[in-house]
Image (tube, rainbow, N blue to C red):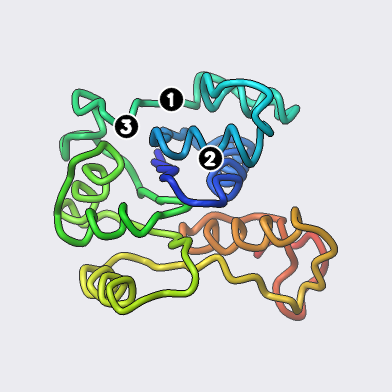
Amino acid sequence: MIIVGISGASGPILGIRLVEELLTAGEPVTAIVSDAARQIIEYEIMEQKAAYIGLAEILTARNQAFDRTRLTEHDNSDFFAPIASGSTAFEAVAVVPCSMKTLSAIVHGYADSLICRTCDVALKEKRQCLIVPRETPLNKVHTRNLHRAACAGIDILPPMPGFYTRPESVDDVVDFIVGKILSLLGKSHHLFASWGGEDGGDC
């Protein structure tokens, strides 16, 4: 099981696309969407035409066919969720995007939300923890916290596109970042061709 946390930073489409790709590959996914992220999803993705009522509905609205039994969503304040305990097995947690507030909470062990608690669990149980920090430019506080994250063993994947794939749309850029996340999680994908590889090949 992969846990995907979507925190309150611009770019929740990155987390949503990651969930889509994992579900398409048959992976069980547990999602956590913070309150701030829900507001940003309403603004950036739903264009304020409706209120956020769940990730499954978002995926359905995006015409994604998926097995709903493989997707679980928990409220960010639900500390009774199974994933809040180290006794619940999961492969990795990815926070996509990761706000600077969430980054700060993670690296200081301030598990005041389910997203931060699952990262805390991943670190103490020696499981993979990955963040996609979404802020620019970065100040000294941000870079210090990123250094703390690296020292704690957290994988840091800034959403920086590779232009060697010749992206033609925002979707291409999103897919490149999501492909990078999948690769770091050890999952194959066809979102972009590896350097020197064939289009559509495993990356």
Residue behind mark 2: 40
Disc 2 crowd rating (10 Å Cα; few below 14, some 14-19, many 20+) is: many
**Residue 74 spot, x, y in % from top left:** 36, 26
* 65 shown above or below 142: above
- Sequence-wise, the earlier of marks 2 and 1 is 2
**Residue 188 spot, x, y in % from top left:** 60, 56
Q: At label 2, which amino acid type do we have?
A: Ile
| Secondary structure beneath label 2 | helix
Residue behind mark 1: 72
Q: Answer yes or no: is residue 32 visible.
A: no
Disc 1 crowd rating (10 Å Cα; few below 14, some 14-19, many 20+) is: some
Q: At label 1, which amino acid type do we have?
A: Thr
Horizontal side of 6 relative to 100 (left or right) equals right
Q: Nearer the viewer, mark 3 or mark 2?
A: 2
Residue occupying the point 54% across, 27% down: 55
Viewer-proximal residue among 93 and 173 = 173
**Separation of disc 3 and disc 1 at Cα?**
13 Å
Disc 3 crowd rating (10 Å Cα; few below 14, some 14-19, many 20+) is: many
Residue behind mark 3: 76
| Secondary structure beneath label 3 | loop
